[in-house]
Structures are given as C-alpha cells and as structure tokens.
Image: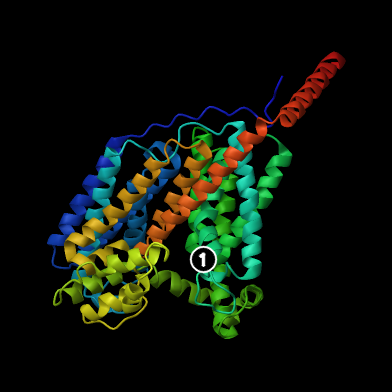
Amino acid sequence: MTQASHPAPVAMPSHASNDSVVHLMVVACFTAGAIQLMSSGQSWVLWLSVTTLTIVAFGSLIRLMAVPTYATSWAVYATSLGLGYGFGAFNTMLRGYTEPKNLLQVTYADIQHVGMAEGAALLIVALLLLASTLDRKKLLPTTLYNPVERRAALIILAMSAVSVVAAIATGNLGYAGGQGSEEGSGRVSVIGSLLASTMTATLGSTVFAFAHEKDKRTRLIIFGLSIILLGALMIQGRRIFLYAMVVSMMGFFAARGTKNFFTRKTVIILLIVASTLAVTSRFYFAMRLAGYKLGPNPTLVELLEGGMDVVLNAESEGLDDANAENQATRTFIIAYLAELLQAGEKHQAVGGDLLVLNVASAVPTVIWPGKWKVMGNGGSEENICHPAFGLPPWDAANTTLTAGLCDFWWPGLVLYPLMVAALYALVNRLFRFTPLVVRTLVCFATVENLFMVENAMNAYLVGIRNITTLAAFAWGVILALQFLDKLPLVQHHREQKALRQQRLAELRKGVT
C-alpha cells in the first residue's frame, strides 16, 4: 500500500477566453494608431493615442492574471509594450508634460514625432494581440502538479533561495541587477545572471504548485523561502520586483481561479501586495539616493543602511520630491523612439549591425570564439546607432522597437518585436511535452522576460539561454525523484508510513 507525501492534485479551475474582447482591443489600437500617424502633431490626438494604449494595456494585464488561457508570448509582449509606451507616457503627460514647450523637459523630439512613435507602438501592439488570437498553444498548462512535481517544486524553491543567499554574500548578485563582484568587476557572473533570470519564474511556479496547500508547516516553509527570493528581487530594481508580484498573482489565480475573487482574504492579499510595492519602491529609490553619497562601488550593506537613513530623514534628504520627479519623467520611454524617428529621417539605418551585436553578446564564446571583435567594434546599441543617426552616445531606453528602427527603419521597427514574441512562442512549444514543473518554469520565465520592455535584444536571447538551463535542472530534479521513488528502501519506507497513518486513522475512528 502506498500513499503520496502530498495531497492529490486539485482540478484546474475552468477559464474562458473570449477572443471578441481581444479583437475589440485590436480594433481600438489600429484605429487610434492610424489617426495618430495621419495627424500633424496635435496634442489632443496624442492624448487619445496614449489613453487608448493605456486602457488596452491594463485590460490585457487583467486578462493575463484572470484568464490563463489568454496567456501567450504575443499577449504578454503586447501588454508589456502597451504599459511601457502607453501607460508610461500617460503617467508623464498627466503630470503636466503635454504641451510642446513642456515636452522639451523629457525629450528633444517635437510633438509630431512623439505622436508618430506612439502611433507605431499602437500598431505593433495591435499586431501582437491579433497574433495571440491565432496562437492556440497557450503558455500556462491546464492541469496542476502531481505529488512528485510538487516535491520537485519545493526542492527547486529551496535550492534557489540558498543559491540567492550565497550569490549575494559572494557579490555574484547585487544591487540594481549587478551580476559581478562588489568590487566593481566588469565580468558578468554566470550564477548571478542565471538567478536574476529565474527567481521570478521559481516564485510563479511555486505559487501555482502550492496555491491549494493545506499543510501549515509546508506553507510556512514556502512562505519563508519565498520571502528570501522577494528580498533579493527587491534589491534588483523596482520594475523587477513589480513583475515578480504580477507573475506570482498570475500563478495564484491560474491555480485558484477568480470565481470568489472579492472575498475578504483576496482583498487583504491585494492590499498587502499594493502596500508592499509602494514601500519597496520608495525604499529602493532611497537606496539610490544613498548610493550617490557613498561613492563608487558601495557594498549592499552600506546601501541598505544608507537607504534606511534616507527614509528616516526623508524631508531633509528630499526623498519624496526626488521620487515623484523620477516617477514622472523616467516612464516617458516613448521619448527615445521619437528622438530616433526624428534624427533618422536625415540618415540611413545601420543594416542589421545591432542584431549582429546582440546575437554576439548572447552566444557563448565557446560557440563563437571571435565574437569579441564584433562586440569590441560596437560595444552597445547606442554606440552603433547614434553616430549613424548623427547623435552623441548616451544610455537610452532601448527596446526591440528602437533596435529595429536603427537597423532597418520602419520594417525593423515592426518586425523586431514580432520576432522576439515568435521566438519565445517557439521555445515554449519545444518544452510543451516536458514534465509540468518544467513547463510552468519556462512559462513564468517567459512572462517575466517579456515584461522587461526596456531591454536590448541580447537580454531576451540570454533569457532564453537561462530558461533552457533552468528547465534542464528542473527536469533533472524530476528524474532524480522518480529514480529514488523506485528504490526498494524508499518504497518500503513509504508503505510503512502509509500503514502507520492508516492505523492511526482507524484508532481515531474507533475513539469517536
């Protein structure tokens, strides 16, 4: 007689996806985009475009969390670009950066080119959403974990938490996404890169696996290990922490459903999440202000202590004013795309140089020994693109849209984001027949990577490399557990445990 060490898996809640809603969003984006591109730069048209894209982006985000069958790489990336180019611009403009003279505070592009950039973003989001309705291979699985996969998920969570602590202690993982040594080494730590790309996926997979967990001791262990990962994600950056919370909520609602969404428990959880995001965002910015005073390469402990000092002396340090200004202007990433559109009209595109640079950055040296020649000549996207467009190099808000524009002008602008979404759709198809824990890790890692809208192309390619590594590790854990379960000693132990539990249940029944 055998008995699983975990409860039997609970049936997956049913979720209905309505393509008509998505089609409505597609029509809205196409219409607003066409109006914007045909206008001559009126302020009210820009407001219409930005507001439309913001509404579509948040509608898509809600569907990603509430309707798991909606989740595809196309839908996720459409949501990401919509929030970045729609809500980001809406947030900035709402604070007074609307009129042409005020726009000069956040971009040197004129309002007409800002509008052209917004119109292009609307059309690209529309194409991605349309593609999502055609892709029937969804990211999230429709069944929940079996006992072996639940054990594997717990092991992966524990090993991830231990690895994160070790990586932070050794400087392989640091503040603001640092993946080198605390002494400021230029190298990129393989462990740091892998952990940075997989912590959120591990959290999402854990929430999905244990959303129905009844055992209090197991829930306590999961909570403690998850807090470690959330703490590490908090020091990585505000957006990264936000994406981790969104992915975790996706995992929770995918497993539990949204039928009883407005219960007291759910409302309390949402209030806690919102409060946590507000507090961590403020503290992270306080760490940034502290870093300006600490000099080059401060340690994480110094940043934490300095950040706490800034929070405790917020008024004298000007924390709230600086934070408000940062949140008002940094979200206007549409500015960079508009600047490239304006500058590029008098110059030629670079013909794929950025794509070659990004591929070289992502491919291991073992496979491409001479890649350093390519990287040495370019260094970064801005170093290649800006001189060709008659601009001085600076650290800009890179996205696949800006890379595509620099490489192949309007065709690249449209094709590059579609190419990234297609690549992640292919990766998820390749892992479709793997164990469930592997599939969910790949799924949530895909969601997180595509939410990173302000990324160069190589970040998405490296993300796929790290996803593959994580999937191989998870699959190895599953195979190891399956092998151990077949050992006679393990089977005997399980049978004895099940027998003791049966006798205990019979004794309790006899007492009652």
- Using the image, determine if residue 137 lies above or below residue 390: above
- The secondary structure type at the circle numbered 1 is loop
Residue drawn at (52%, 53%), measured in percent from left and top? Answer: 200
Q: Position of residue 83 (x, y in %)?
A: 36, 57
Q: Quadrant of residue 298?
A: bottom right
* Mark 1 nearby-residue class (10 Å; few <14, some 14–19, many ≥20): some
Using the rendered view, name the quadrant where residue 217 is placed. top right
Drawn side of residue 183 relative to residue 376, left or right: right
Asked if residue 158 shows in the view, the reply is yes
Q: Position of residue 382 (x, y in %)?
A: 31, 76
Q: Is residue 409 above or below residue 249?
A: below
Judge from the rendering whether residue 366 lies leftward or rightward of residue 134; answer left or right: right
Residue nearest the viewer, comparing 472 with 118: 472
Which residue does the image show at 57% across and 57% down from the upper left? Answer: 275
Query: What residue occupies the far top of the structure in this picture?
Result: 510
Q: Residue at x 58, y 39 (%)?
A: 478
- Comparing 480 with 69, the one in front is 480
